[in-house]
Amino acid sequence: MEQQNLLLFFSSCFFLLPLLSEIQGVQSSSSHHHHSHRGLYGFRPTKLFVFGDSYADTGNNRKTEANSWKVPYGITFPGKPAGRFSDGRVLTDYLAKYLGLKSPIPYRWRKYATNRLRYGINFAYGGTGVFNTMVSDPNMTTQIDFFQNLINDSVYEKWDLQSSLALVTVAGNDYGAFLAKGGSAEDLPAFITRVVDQLAVNLKRIHSMGVRKVAVTALQPLGCLPRSTVHNSFQQCNATENVAVDFHNMLLQQAVAKLNNESKDSRAFVILDLYGSFNKVLKNKGEYLGSVTFETPLKPCCMGISGKYYCGSVDEKGAKMYTSFRVILLDLRTNFTKNSPIKLPEILQYVVPEALEGSQKPPTYIATSI
Ligand SMILES: *[C@@H]1O[C@H](CO)[C@@H](O)[C@H](O)[C@H]1NC(C)=O
Ligand SMILES: *[C@@H]1O[C@H](CO)[C@@H](O)[C@H](O)[C@H]1NC(C)=O
Ligand SMILES: *[C@@H]1O[C@H](CO)[C@@H](O)[C@H](O)[C@H]1NC(C)=O
Ligand SMILES: *[C@@H]1O[C@H](CO)[C@@H](O)[C@H](O)[C@H]1NC(C)=O
Ligand SMILES: *[C@@H]1O[C@H](CO)[C@@H](O)[C@H](O)[C@H]1NC(C)=O
C-alpha cells in the first residue's frame, strides 16, 4: 500500500555513501544565481582536477558495487543514476559551474571522452578517504598517483597545470572507517591528527606537481547527518561528533596556513568552508535562501526502511527497501506550504559561492577540548 508520505518524487537530497549516511538537502528560493567565469582571488582556472570522495565523485564508482548507480540517485540530474551520490549534481559540478567550466570527466572515462580532457579530470571515488577505508577504491594518494601518471605521459603539460585548480574533498570516510573498525573515542584525536597530516602532504604534492591553486573542503558538521540524528528523530545534532569535526577543521586551518606560508603564492591553498556554509543553510530561518525555510532540516529525504537497507536498496523481487520523503517547505513570506517536487541539492548551489566567499577570510573555528 502506498503511504501518504511516500512519494515518487522527492526533493533536494544529497545522498552519500552509507558510511556517512545522507544529508537532507535544501530548496532554493525563486532566484537562481548563474555565476559564470568567477575565480578564486582573481584566478580563473581553465581546468579542474578533483580528488576525494562522494562529495566530488561524478561516476568513478563501479556500478556493481555502489548505490550511486541505483534509483533514486541521479533522477533529477542527469535524469537517471550515473554514479553521483546525489539525486542530482555534486560539489564538483557546482564548483565547475561557478568557475564557468564544464564538469571534468570521471577518470575511468578518460579514454572515451578525450575531447573533454581539456576541462581536467575527476579522480574522486565515493567512499574513499585519505587512508584506506571500507571500500576498495583508490585512496587519495593513489588518486594523485593516477594524476602523476598522466603528467608523466604528457597528457597534461606544465602550462596546463599552471592554469588549473584542484578540488580536494574530505567528507569523513576516514572517520566512518575508524569507528566501523572499532576505533575508540580516546584514540580519535590522534587519528584526526594523522588524517590532517596526510591530507597536508597530499595538498602539497598536488601543488608541487604544478597545479596553481588547491582548494580543500573543511569537514561539514558530521554530527548533523542522519546517521547521527536518527536516534533522536532527526531533532538534534550530535555535539560530541561536531566537536571532533571542529578539531579536524582547526588542524586543517593550521596546516593550510603553514602551506601558504611556505609557498611563493601566499594564497595557493584555499579552504572551502563547508562547515560554516552547511550550518548556515541548515539553521536558516528564512533570511538566507530568500524566504524559504525547512520544517525538519535534519530529516533525510531518502533512507533504508531498516538498518540493513540504504537509500536505493531493493529486495530480491525488486521491491523498494527505502523510503523517500518530500520535503515540505514553508515560505515565511506567505506561509504557503510548497509541496511540488523540488530540484536537487540546490543546497550546494548556495554552499559553493558561500564557501568561496568565506575563503577570502579565514573561517573561524572554535577549538574545543576533545
Ligand atoms: C593508499 O593505498 C595504497 C594501496 O592500497 C597503499 O599501499 C597506501 O599505503 C595507501 N596510502 C595511504 C596514505 O594510506
Ligand atoms: C613520474 O616521473 C617521475 C620523474 O620524472 C618519477 O619519479 C615518478 O616515479 C613517475 N611517477 C609515476 C607514477 O610513474
Ligand atoms: C554522539 O556520537 C558519539 C560518537 O559516535 C556516540 O558515542 C554518542 O553516543 C553520541 N551521542 C548521542 C547523544 O547520540
Ligand atoms: C612563516 O614561516 C617563517 C619561517 O619560514 C616563520 O618564521 C613564521 O613564523 C611563519 N609564519 C606563520 C604565520 O606561520
Ligand atoms: C506565518 O505564520 C506565523 C506563525 O503561524 C505568523 O506568526 C506569521 O505572522 C505568518 N506570516 C504571514 C505573512 O502570514
Image (cartoon, rainbow, N blue to C red):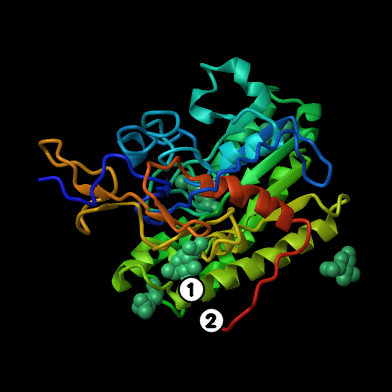
* Residue 240 visible, this orientation: yes
Point out residue 56 in the picture as x, y percentages from the top left corner: 53, 43
Quadrant containing the N terminus is top left
Q: Badge 1: few (under 14), some or many (20 or more) residues near its Cα, within 10 Å?
A: some
- Asked where in the image residue 81 lies, by quadrant, the reply is top left
- Label 2 secondary element: loop
Is any atom of residue 66 visible in this view?
no
> Looking at the rendered structure, which numbered label has been put on residue 370?
2
Task: Looking at the picture, tell me which residue is in the foreground, 252 or 153.
Answer: 252
> Which quadrant would residue 271 be assigned to in this image?
bottom right
Q: What element carries label 1?
A: helix
Q: Residue at x 80, y 34 (%)?
A: 162
Q: Residue at x 81, y 28 (%)?
A: 159
Residue 188 - label:
1
Neighbours of disc 2 within 10 Å: few (<14), some (14-19), many (20+): some
Specify which label sits upstream in the sequence, 2 or 1: 1
Mark 2–mark 1 CB contact (< 8 Å): yes
Q: Position of residue 321 (x, y in %)?
A: 19, 47
Q: What x and y, as percent, mark residue 293?
A: 49, 59
